[in-house]
Image (cartoon, helix red, strand yellow):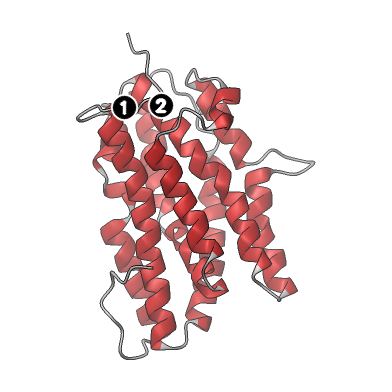
Amino acid sequence: MKQDAPMQNELMSPDKLEETLRDVGAERYHIHHPFHKLMNAGDLTKGQMQAWALNRYCYQAIIPRKDAIVISKSDDPAFRREWRKRIIDHDGDDDSEGGVARWLQLAASLGLDPDVVKTKSLALPATRFAVNAYLDVVTNSSLLVAVASSLTEMFSPVAIGERVPAMLARYDYITEDTLAYFTPRLHQAPRDAEFALDYVKTWADTPDKQQSVINVLITKCDILWAQLDALHHAYVEPGHIPPGAFQPQDE
């Protein structure tokens, strides 16, 4: 894993570690990306919105797989019970649908065929590389680092809080039902982030461990940023859509 953060030579207090992690998000979270800003400003075409939903599905679909890998690394039943809530949130259970299904509903409401979206066959190559990179990071890391990779959830409620009202106000074809995916995330993400942050602050108890959790959060932010870079390059500027990728049919 790349070492992008300044090397920590002394042990930080847990609160200082949290401050450092939050600084990473403040600087690097994809809420600052030009594509995200165009979306919130109402400046994307419907085809560009479709491209976003189709490609973002690749990321949504691997989240429960990622969480299953995290669970497999732990010997603690209490940890596994807590973490498996994330899988139910995304995969659903007998009583409710999960976030993956709600994302497919979002895609369908934008005019995409959910069965095509599920194949991921029209996703950008860079999208697939990015989400597979995330699985690789979690698979090849310690439990502590794998947990820390999820800490982007600390910042997602702000993004959702901006995105949902902006979309409803600026895209006349988007309704509250379209954006049903985001409603439960407003309480799921803070719950999950609090657990993960407490775990990291407890177990990152050496300078090296603290360095590793800072680095993986930077890496995760880079992975999310890279996905929007790919969308912007293909569908905004310069508009180079790779062969075989989704082609918007805007009027």
Which residue matches tag 2? 245
Q: Which residue is drawn at 51% across and 37% down?
A: 57
Amino acid carrying label 1: it is Ile
The answer to whether any part of residue 171 appears in the image is no
Tell me: residue 237, above or below residue 94. above
Whole-angstrom CA distance, mark 1 to mark 2, is 7 Å
Q: Which residue is drawn at 38% across and 52% down?
A: 223
Mark 1–mark 2 CB contact (< 8 Å)? yes
Quarter of the image with the C terminus in it: top left
- Return the residue found at the far right: 94
Which residue matches tag 1? 241
Quarter of the image with the N terminus in it: bottom left
The answer to whether any part of residue 20 appears in the image is yes
Task: Count every numbered label the image shows and give the total.
Answer: 2
Tell me: residue 201, above or below residue 117. below
Q: Which residue is drawn at 66% across and 52% down?
A: 87
Percent position of residue 134, x then y: 47, 55
Element at badge 1? loop
Percent position of residue 154, x then y: 44, 60
Tell whether 63 sits left or right of 87. left
Tell whether 113 sits left or right of 95. left
- Return the residue found at the far bottom: 10
Amino acid carrying label 2: it is Ala
Percent position of residue 55, x then y: 44, 35
Q: Residue at x 47, y 48 (%)?
A: 131
- Return the residue found at the far top: 251
Q: Residues within 10 Å of mark 2 (few under 14, many from 20)?
A: some
Percent position of residue 196, x then y: 53, 68
Tell me: residue 89, above or below residue 51. below
Q: Which mark is residue 127?
A: none
Tell whether 65 sits left or right of 137. right
